[in-house]
Image (spheres, rainbow, N blue to C red):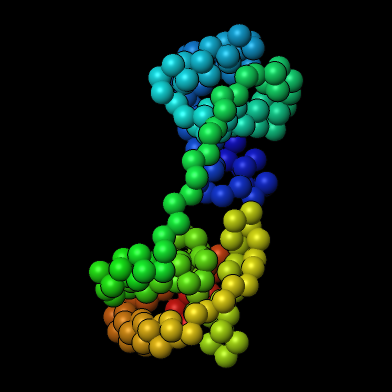
Amino acid sequence: MRAELRSHHYSSSTEKSYVAWARRLIRFHQRHPRELAAAEIKQFLDHLLLNGASASSHLQAICAIRLLYKCVLNEPAPWLDGLVRPRNQRPLPVVLSKEEVRAVLDRMKGTPKLMAALLYGSGLRLLECARLRVKDIDFASAQILVRQGKGRKDRVTLLPANLRLPLMDHLKQVQALHDADLTVGAGSVALPGALSRKLPNASKS
């Protein structure tokens, strides 16, 4: 199931969730999924609802089970399409005013403050900010290249002018830390894809 999810380029969090739902289904009935009928799948999903599962969790469980049968076991389960899905009532988003955002940022400091400012000013998601790489920041054009964002898509977003100097100062501190790590034989980072094999020295450059 993990191999199938990765071949479709699902995110690591989705992979973890889908595998967990498949495990829960098997543990619930103590039988192989091929031996389960539509009524037994419905019994598992009803059990989730009766035990407080949210509408989004219920829907995710259905998607995981559908992928399990269709792509892993090669046994399409058309009866899954007829299952009743609970309504997911979306609450109205809470939007902070500029003064409220400024008040929050004023109570932060260091790297967390810089990250929070990037999330707000550049529209980055949390993981996108945490995975941001030096080469993807274009100070000259005041842009940030977000690689492999939601849906595995790349996009360009803006770099706020008031974050240029704080970000440059942060990069200088990181460079000094990196140089100190290199002197003791550390300082390597994980590289995406097969870059670690293609460029064996890039992880420390």
Residue 184 rendering spot, x and y as whole percentages? 29, 80
Quadrant containing the N terminus is top right
Q: Is residue 170 left or right of residue 126?
A: left
Residue 99 in the image: state x and y as whole percent: 36, 69
Image point 62% across, 42% down: which residue? 5
The correct choice, above or below, for 17 with respect to 196 in the image is above
Question: Nearest the camera: 200 or 191?
Answer: 191
How far from the left and from the top, in percent, is residue 148?
A: 60, 62
> Which quadrant holds residue 111?
bottom left
Q: Residue furthest bottom?
A: 140
Total tally of numbered discs in the picture: 0
* Left or right: 121 as drawn, with respect to 198: left
Q: Residue at x 58, y 69 (%)?
A: 146
Q: Is residue 180 above or below residue 198?
A: below
| Residue appearing at x 25%, y 69% in the figure | 107
Foreground of the two, 66 or 117: 117
Horizontally, residue 85 falls left or right of residue 47, namely: right
Q: Residue at x 48, y 72 (%)?
A: 121
Residue 184 seen in render: yes
- Let me know if residue 189 appears in the view: no
Q: Find residue 192 and report its horizontal and vertical position in percent.
A: 56, 65
Work out whether residue 174 or residue 146 is closer to the camera in this orientation and state it: 146
